[in-house]
Amino acid sequence: MKKTHALAGLVLSTALFGAGLTNAFAADETLRSLADKNGIYIGAILNSQWFGGGLPGNYEQIHKSQFNIVVAENEMKFDATEPQEGRFNYNNGDKMVRYAQQNGMRVRGHALAWHSQVPGWVNNYKNDKQKLLKVLKNHIQNVVGHWKGKVAEWDVVNEAISNNEPQWRTGSVWYQGIGPEFIDSAFVWAHAVDPDAELCYNDYNLEQGVNPKAKAGFLLEQVKRWVKNGIPIHCVGSQTHVEDTTTDKHFIGSPDSLRSLAKELAKLNVKLKITELDIGFKSGINVSKSDLERQGQTFRQYLDIILEEPNADTYLIWGVSDKWSWLGGLNRQKGLIYDDNLKPKPAFDSILVRLQTYEPPKDSAKADSTVKDSTTKDSTALDPGQSIKQFNAPNSLSLHVAGRTLFVTGLASKTTAKVDLLDLQGRPVYSTNCINGTVDLSNIAEGLYVVRVQNGSTNLTKRISIK
Ligand code: G3I
């Protein structure tokens, strides 16, 4: 998509000042289409109300048109998936996976081991280390196994680090009953079940810099140890629940501090993902138009990390509309990109225009993960009675890598696609024509690449890494 810089400048300045910009470039461009073009994932949770059918139709319409990655707010957590010992309930998770498959979206799983939302029966074993290890292993093997090949990435461990000083969260049943080594084991067990899944450690308040006294500094030391010991950790999820810096002084995170964590993780070949973004204002205050415009700038600054850091690929917002947000429980408000009436806020314009105007540096390219999106080929795996038709809207070309195979979906019928693999310096590595929607990559060396698919007038470029 070519555009004049003058117009881009105008659009950018207008949008950043929240003039309720309508897209000046291409009316059909969405956060999703622009995220695809930039080879990143942009998403939002499916709020718990969605699972019960309690949301208006335009919530889902917005969600599937604007986002290419999805996570369940609560429905894949321990208490939801194993409410009784050994009795698993996947119904809500399956509903979300079906939705994702029908709409060609990647699925993120949240969360396997967390101190919160642990069903009561687990605490019965808090003084029995061996039993607790068996409980956690069995949970991970069953849940990851159930969605193998359908959930592309997991928050294997969530919030295991204390907030007060750089140390483990000692109040967690897993820490108390097993010790911090529960984390190492959880990653090993999850990887053994689904070697293609990207495995993340997820936490909040990681936006305060990486000095050893900061939470992110303590985490970085652990990631170095895990990587050195061969623990299969592929990513760190930064929840990024932050406040607007001028109206709420509770905790000041900063995009620059989070970027410094991304840079340190890149040295370890570990990705950074923004997994639960919201930028709230203190509850009860009047939020002005200029407050919302400033909020939009902060959303954009966090997006810049994902666009610009080669080991960052995911920008996931913890909600669609301010009307359905957990933030009230934190004495905050208006932290999302759609208002109570599901109308885009200045923050939506700000990230849309950023995606439209972002020009990647010539010598670098984003590299996406190997793991498959949720668009699995095996539509009967979920429920033979509800086989899933792969839904591809016109020119919804999408691609994902599973193991050593590249899958291309959304090809115009009876056409082939030209597929080029380039290294991160943009040098051609391999070219072929894709006829049946798959390309064999088994002869390609491990590493980070950019894959470019051309099908008629539709192009798609994405970052991949081949393990
Ligand atoms: O399902 C029950 C329902 O049966 C009951 O009637 C109702 C009223 O008591 O509660 C419902 O459970 C609630 C659950 O959300 C599902 O809606 C819990 O009370 C409530 O505490 C829970 O809150 C969730 C919170 O995690 C739990 O810690 C929020 O929706 C969810 O947004 C929030 O998400 C977390 C991430 O998982 C981890 N990072 C922080 C983030 C915000 O806290």
Image (spheres, helix red, strand yellow):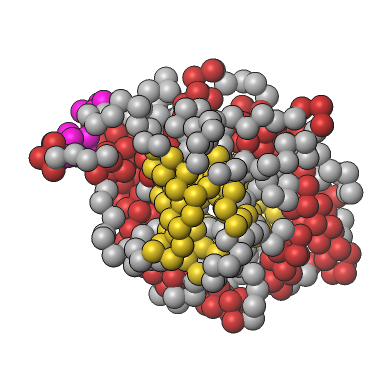
Q: Is residue 144 rendered to the left or right of residue 43?
A: right
Magenta residues span 8-22
Q: Residue at x 45, y 48 (%)?
A: 418
Provide the major secondary structure of the magenta segment: helix
In the displayed structure, 153 sits above or below 387; it is below
Q: Residue at x 49, y 49 (%)?
A: 433
In the displayed structure, 195 sits above or below 321; it is below
Residue 124 position within the rendered picture, expressed as x and y whole percent measured from the top left: 87, 56
For this rendering, which residue is in front, 362 or 67?
362
Q: Residue at x 73, y 47 (%)?
A: 147
Quadrant of res 84: top right
Q: Residue at x 14, y 40 (%)?
A: 4
Whether the magenta-drawn stretch holds residue 20 is answered as yes
Residue 132 position within the rendered picture, expressed as x and y whole percent measured from the top left: 84, 63
Quadrant of res 336: top left
Whether the magenta-drawn stretch holds residue 242 is answered as no
Residue 119 position within the rendered picture, expressed as x and y whole percent measured from the top left: 79, 47
Q: Quadrant of the C terminus?
A: bottom right
Q: Is residue 386 rendered to the left or right of residue 22?
A: right
